Amino acid sequence: MTTPTIFSLKVLQAINDWQICANTKRGNKLKSLAANLPLRYRTCQHECYRKINMNKGATFDLMGKFSLKEKISSWSTDIDIVKKFKRGVTKDVLHEQSIIFKLIPSCTQVIINLDEVYRCVVDFNLNCHCIKMI
């Protein structure tokens, strides 16, 4: 049984901080702390989705250069979550343009796979609950 003891308090706090307010400083701290986690928690074999709000510069980069400047960001394995998160994909093209990207990330593109982290913690808690009941 995998236990969450592999997640130090510092790692768990960095995950919490990132989810409260994602920014470069918090992203870099999470990246640093997650670097030593087992590969299972730093890879993803599933399609991932991300909504990006486009400004004129980003639209030019995407259409002209076929690339976007990427930063540390959150992606989801559930497209329905991405469609609804932060007001979803807007239809108000005069004020905001947004698109949803789909990607199967390489191992170098994943900082931490929260789906795997949470699955580990849930499995651990369920097993502990069963042990207590015996």
Image (spheres, rainbow, N blue to C red):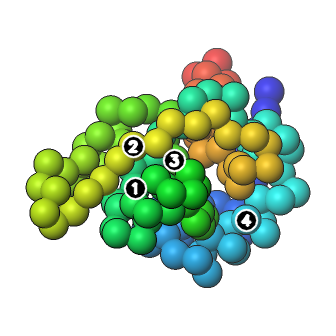
Disc nearer the start of the sequence (4/2): 4
| Residue lying farthest to the top in this orientation | 134
Mark in the foreground, 4 or 2: 2
Give the quarter of the image for residue 79.
Answer: top left
Q: Are marks 4 and 1 in contact (CB under 8 Å)?
A: no
Above or below — where is 19 with respect to 7? Answer: below
**Furthest residue to the bottom?**
25
Mark 1 burial class by Cα count in 10 Å: few <14, some 14-19, many 20+? some
Residue at 69%, 73% in the rendered image: 28
Of 92 and 85, the residue lying toward us: 92
Q: Nearer the viewer, mark 3 or mark 1?
A: 1
The image's mark for residue 52 is 1
Nearer the observer: mark 2 or 3; the answer is 2
Residue at point 58% right, 37% down? 103
Q: Which residue is mark 2?
A: 100
Q: CA distance from mark 1 to mark 2?
A: 6 Å
Query: Is residue 114 found left or right of 55 in the rendered image?
Result: right
Residue 31's disc is 4
